[in-house]
Amino acid sequence: MQAHIANVVTHFKGICYAWHVVNEAVNDLRSADYRDTVFFRTIGPAYIPLAFSAAAAADKDVKFYYTDYGLEILAEKANAVVKIVQDLQARGIKIDGVGLQGHNVVGATPSRSSLVSSLRKYTALGLEVAWTEVEIRHSKLPPSDFDLKQQSDDYAALVGSCLDVKECVGVTVWQFTDKYNWVPQSYKTEGDACLWSSEYQRRPAYDAIINLLRATINGTASSSSAAASLPGSTLTGFLGAALSAWFLL
């Protein structure tokens, strides 16, 4: 594991903005124990500090993230990730951010204010945050006009939450088109989760995001003062920074 991390980080040194050093280490159960992975079975929980230490030894100048899904919904899981971060910090091991994947369902996506609270759980630890694998799927197909409007509102809420938190560096979608998205393979009766259809037709959610960003740039956004005060240069970073992050484990 350490050799793999050293080889990959060294090979791409100076190219990536950040590495997702450890991904999805916590299960979804109320106990929020470690997931049963080859790394956990072989090494135990120490694989996480070992991985972050190996990454830092290979390139101390890049950002290092822990990433997981459901952190905006599953409280026990979110708190378990806080403990992982605190353990790394107590050991003096470099960790710069937490990536919240942002896989959500139309109509069940948390509110903008709730999403802000989820982000601030980690910024309170001195970290930056990002939404790293966003898509918001319909639970039934085909979606109605009401469903499409709700999807637009949910996407805008998620993107808006990042605008409301100054330590949120970006939003990355999980594929831009349903043609290559994972949802239809895992949820046979659900889908239409991306900003473009399988036929590359733009969905209303895309326009909702663009309108939100345009209003923020123009200073007419109706949310928090943090969003309304962002300069255009900050929004450029917001749109692009997270696009150069890659996974290690």
Image (spheres, rainbow, N blue to C red):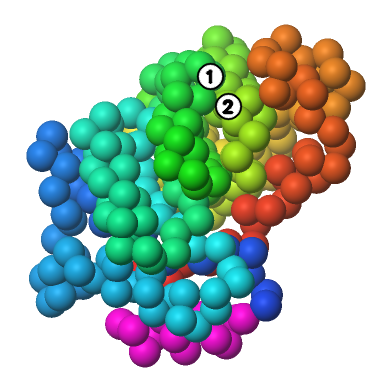
Q: Secondary structure at mark 1?
A: helix
The answer to whether the residues at label 2 and label 1 have Cβ atoms under 8 Å apart is yes
Of residue 112 and residue 90, the one placed in the foreground of this image is 90
User: Can you say which quadrant of the picture contains the C terminus?
Assistant: bottom left
Residue at 37% across / 64% down in the picture? 92
Q: Write the start and end of the magenta stretch as one range.
A: 1-13
User: Can you say which quadrant of the picture contains the N terminus?
Assistant: bottom left
Q: Position of residue 85 (x, y in %)?
A: 34, 51
Q: Which amino acid type is shown beneath numbered disc 2?
A: Ser
Circle 2 sits on which residue?
161
Instruction: Quadrant for residue 199, please give it.
Output: top right
Residue at 34% across / 84% down in the picture? 2
Q: Position of residue 103 (x, y in %)?
A: 43, 39
State left or right for residue 204 relative to residue 79: right
Residue 12: say if magenta.
yes
Taking the image as drawn, is residue 166 in sight? yes
> Which numbered marker is on residue 83?
none
Of residue 173 and residue 176, the one placed in the foreground of this image is 173
Circle 1 sits on which residue?
112
* Sooner in the amino-acid sequence: mark 2 or mark 1: 1
State left or right for residue 170 relative to residue 118: right
State left or right for residue 231 relative to residue 67: right
Q: Is residue 148 above or below residue 64?
A: above
Q: Which amino acid type is shown beneath numbered disc 1?
A: Arg
Q: CA distance from mark 2 to mark 1?
A: 5 Å
